Amino acid sequence: MGISRDAAKNRRYWDERADDYQAEHGEFLHGAPMAWGTFRIPEEEVGALGEVRGKGVLELGCGAAQWSIALARAGARPVGLDNSRRQLAHARRGMRRAGVEFPLVHAAAERVPLPDRSFDAILSDHGAMSFVDPERSVPECARLLRPGGILAFCMSTPFRDACWSERSERVVRTLQAPYFEVGRWEGEGHVEFQLAYGAWIRLFRRHGLGVEDLVELRPPEGARTTYTDYAPLSWARRWPAEHVWVVRRESAER
Ligand SMILES: C[S@@+](CC[C@H](N)C(=O)[O-])C[C@H]1O[C@@H](n2cnc3c(N)ncnc32)[C@H](O)[C@@H]1O
C-alpha cells in the first residue's frame, strides 16, 4: 500500500531524526510518560482519557511509545503506531526494558491498516495528529473508534503558531503569521498541519465526533522541559502554547 507524499517526506525526516530526538528527549519522556506536551502536564490533571484499565488504546505517532508503555502498565491494551521504522526500534527497546509487550504497527496514520471500530480510545501527543492533514486523520480516527470512544490529542495552539517568527526561529510576543491562513506548513524536511478553532470543530462534527473539552496546558512555575526551543516557560505561562482536544465518537449511527 503506497503512502502519500507528505507521509513519505515525514517518514524520511523522522527516520533520520529519531536517534537524536530520543537522545535529547527520550529519558525525559520516560520519566513522565502519562503526561501531555513539552512540559509533561500529568494526565491525572488533564483527565482526557478517563479510566484506561482494560481499554483498547491506539497511540498515533507513538515515537518510542513512552505513553503506550505506561498505559500497558496501567492495565490498558495499547497499540503503538508510527510512520518511522527507526522510532519504532526505540519503542521496542523501551518495551523490553519495561518488560511489557503490545503490538507496534509501522504505518502512516493517513491510512491505518486496522479494522473499523477497533479502539476505545486514540491518543496522539505531538504525534501523527500534528503531521497528517486533518481532512485525512480525523475521518480515520472516527472509523477506528468504537461508538462512545475518545480521541485525545495534544498539539500546538494556533496562538503559538501565529507567534512563531520564521526569521528568529522562535516564539515571540507579537503576532507574526495570519491566523486565517493556518493549514499546511512545510518546514525543512517535514510537513505539519494546523486548523483554525472553528474549522477543527466543524471537521469533528462532520465525522460524528463531539467536542468534550479543549484543555489549554499551562505549565506550573518552575516546570522543566527538554524541548527548550518549543516555547519558553515564561511564554507558555502567559499564553497557551499547547492544548489537548478531547472529542468523543457519537454513539448513534449517522
Ligand atoms: C514529535 S514526535 C512525537 C512522538 C511521541 N508522541 C513523543 O512524544 O515523543 C512525532 C512522531 O509522529 C510520527 N509521525 C509523523 N508523521 C506520521 C504519520 N503520517 N503517521 C504516523 N506517525 C507519524 C513521527 O514518526 C514521530 O515519531
Image: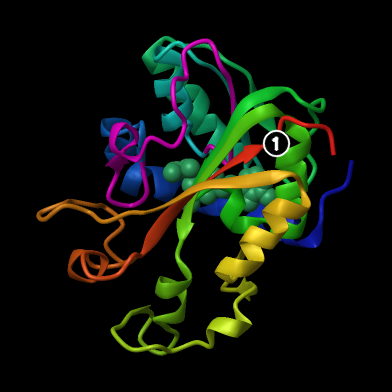
Residue at image point 47% right, 34% down: 64
Q: Counting other residues with Cα less than 10 Å from the Cα at mark 1, is it few (<14), some (14-19), or many (20 or more)?
A: some
Q: Quadrant of the N terminus?
A: top right
Give the residue at mark 1: 250
| Residue at disc 1, secondary structure | loop
Q: Nearer the viewer, residue 133 or 252?
A: 252
Position of residue 136 in the picture relative to residue 17 (left or right) = right
Q: How is the image coloured?
A: rainbow
Q: Nearer the viewer, residue 3 or 45?
A: 45
- Where in the figure is residue 96, as x and y percent of width and height? 44, 15
Q: From what the image shows, is residue 211 above or below residue 77? A: below
Q: Residue furthest right?
A: 1
- Where in the figure is residue 181, as x and y percent of width and height? 62, 83
Occupied quadrant, residue 240: bottom left
Q: From what the image shows, is residue 182 above or below residue 76? A: below
In the image, the segment drawn in magenta is 36-62
Residue at image point 85% right, 39% down: 254
Q: From what the image shows, is residue 229 above or below residue 54? A: below
Occupied quadrant, residue 46: top left
